[in-house]
Image (cartoon, coloured by chain):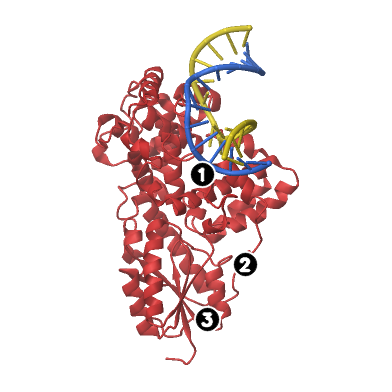
Chain colours: A red, B yellow, C blue
Amino acid sequence: MSDQATILYWIRRDMRVSDNPALSEAVNSGAYVLPVFIYDDWFSQLGAAPKFRLEKSLVSLQKQYEQLGSYLTIRKGPARAVLRELINETGATSVVWSRDLDPNAIERDTEIKQDLKANCINAKSYRGQVLFEPWKVSTKTGGFYRVYTPFWNSVKDQFVDLTLNSPNSISSPSERPPTLTVEDLSLGAAMSGGSNILGKYIEAGELAAQTKLKNFLDGPVSNYSEDRNIPHLNATSLLSDHLAWGEISPNQCWNSAFPTFLDGVMGAETFLKELVWREFAYHLIYHTPHIVSKSWREEWEAFPWRTDSNHEDVIAWKQGRTGIPFVDAAMREMYVTGRMHNRGRMMVASFLTKHLMTHWRIGLEWFSDCLIDWDPASNAMGWQWSAGSGPDATPYFRVFNPVTQLQKFDPEGIYTKRWIAELSDTPSDTSLSYFNAIPKHWKFDKESVYPPAIMSPEEGRKRALEVYSNRGF
DNA sequence: TAGCTCGTTGGACAA
DNA sequence: TTTGTCCAACGAGCT
C-alpha cells in the first residue's frame, strides 16, 4: 500500500464527472480517489425500467473513469458494510458523496455518516442534485413553500453559479480492489422482454446529456412554451432521465439556459420554470417525506379510492387498452420508450384517479416500474397533484376530458396513430413495436380489436365530481 | 393581525 | 370560431 491517502467517492445518483463537487473535492485534495458504486437496497428496490436505465448509465460512467485514468469499483450489499469493507481493504481515510434528498437515502446516509465518524473516518456530503438546497429556501415566516408560484418567485433570483468543470484526470490506487462487473448486477433481469426495444430509446451518459441540452437550446427552446404541449412533436429537452440519474446537473441546465432567457426567449423561461418544478418536488419531499406514500393532505386518506390493483379497469389502463385513444397511446408510449409526454402523464393520471377513481399510489407504482426517468420526488408530486390530494393541487372539478384534450393537442391523430396499431389500416412501426415489447401473458397482439371505451368521458367526469364534491369522505 | 390576492397544465356553456 | 365566465371555496403567502 502506498503512503498516499485514499478517498472513497461513493457514487449514487450522480453519474457524471463535471459539476460534481464531491468528486472535485476528492480529486483536488491530492489523495488517491477510488470511485465506488454500491448496489444496495435503495437500488435493488427500483422498478424494472429504472434498473435497466441504471445499467446503461453505469456502463457509460465506467468508460468515463477509464478515460480519466481511473476505474469504477462496483460492489453489492448494505452500503455501510461495503464501505467499511473497502476502508479496510484500501486504508481510505475519507468518504465523500453527493447528497440524495430521497427520504430513504437521507436515512441511510445519516446513519452511515455517524458510523464513519464514530470510527474516525472523515465523511462529507456535497450539493449536486438540486439548485437550491431545501433548507436554504423558506417563506418570510420561516416555513417551507407549499405553493409553486411563490416558490418560483423566491428562488428565481437566488441562483449562484457554482458550476464546476470536469477533472482532467483522476488518480486512483494502482492496486485495484476486487470489483463486480455491471453485468454481474443483472439490472436487465426484471425487464419482461422489451429490453431490446427500450434500449433503442436510451442514450445514457454525460456526453449524451450535454449534447441534448445543446441541441435543445439551439432550436426547440424558442417555441418551447407552446410546442411542449403537443405530444407528437420533438419539442422538449428530453433531459429528464439524465437529470434523474445525475448525468447532468440542474446547475448546468440552468446556466446554459439562463443567457437565452436574458435574451428574452420566452421558451427559456418556461424551461427554467420546469427545472424549478423539479426543485419544488425535492423541496416538498424533503419537508414532507410522507408525500411518497400517503396523501399529502391528510383528509384525502379517507377518499373512497379503488385500491385493487388487479381490477380489470386498472389492468386495461396499464396495458393501454382502455378504448380511450389518448390514454392508450400515452400508456403504450411509456411501455415502449420508458418515457411519456408530459401532457400524456397528466391525462392518464387524471383518467386513473378521477374517471376510474383509483388510488394515485397504484399509478405511482406503475410509473415507478416503467419510467426510465423515474424520480421519487417528481413522481410523488405529480401523482398527488393530479389526484387532488397534494400540495398546490388541481381543484377537484378540474377533470381532463381525454376526447377534448386530443382535439386540442393532437387534432390530426399523429400521436395516437404513432402508438395504436389497431386504429390504422397501415400501422406505424412504433405502434407495432408495442406488441413486441409487452409480455406474452397479456394475450394481446396486433390482430386484436381495439376495445370499446371502458368508461365514457362524460359519465366518468360526472361520477368523479359527485364523489369529489361530497364533503363526507 | 387582518385583509387581500392568487392559484401550471380544464371543461361547459353562453354570447 | 373565438372569447369570457363560472365552476367552490380554501389556504398559502404577502403586505
x, y percent for residue A192: 30, 47
The residue at 66%/44% (across/down) is: A269
Q: Is residue A429 visible?
A: no
Tell me the quarter of the image containing the C terminus of chain A. top left
Query: Label 2: few (<14), some or many (≥20) within 10 Å?
Result: some
Q: Chain of mark 2?
A: A
Decide which of A461, A74 is in the foreground and name it: A461
Residue A148 in the image: above or below residue A95: above
Residue A146's disc is 1
Residue A70 in the image: above or below residue A370: below
User: Which numbered mark, 2 or 3, is in the foreground of this view?
Assistant: 2
Element assignment for label 1: loop
Q: Amino acid at mark 2?
A: Leu
Residue at the spot of label 2: A164
The disc, 2 or 3, on the residue closer to the chain's N-terminal end is 2
Q: CA distance from mark 2 to mark 3?
A: 18 Å
x, y percent for residue A73: 40, 74
The disc, 1 or 2, on the residue closer to the chain's N-terminal end is 1
x, y percent for residue A438: 32, 40
Quadrant hosting residue A111: bottom left
x, y percent for residue A371: 41, 46
Element assignment for label 2: loop
Decide which of A55, A228 is in the foreground and name it: A228
Residue A326 in the image: above or below residue A290: above
- Could you tell whether A68 is left or right of A367 in the image? right
Q: CA distance from mark 1 to mark 2?
A: 31 Å
- Could you tell whether A336 is left or right of A146 in the image? left
Residue at the spot of label 3: A171
Q: Is residue A198 visible?
A: yes
Q: Is disc 2 in the same subunit as disc 3? A: yes
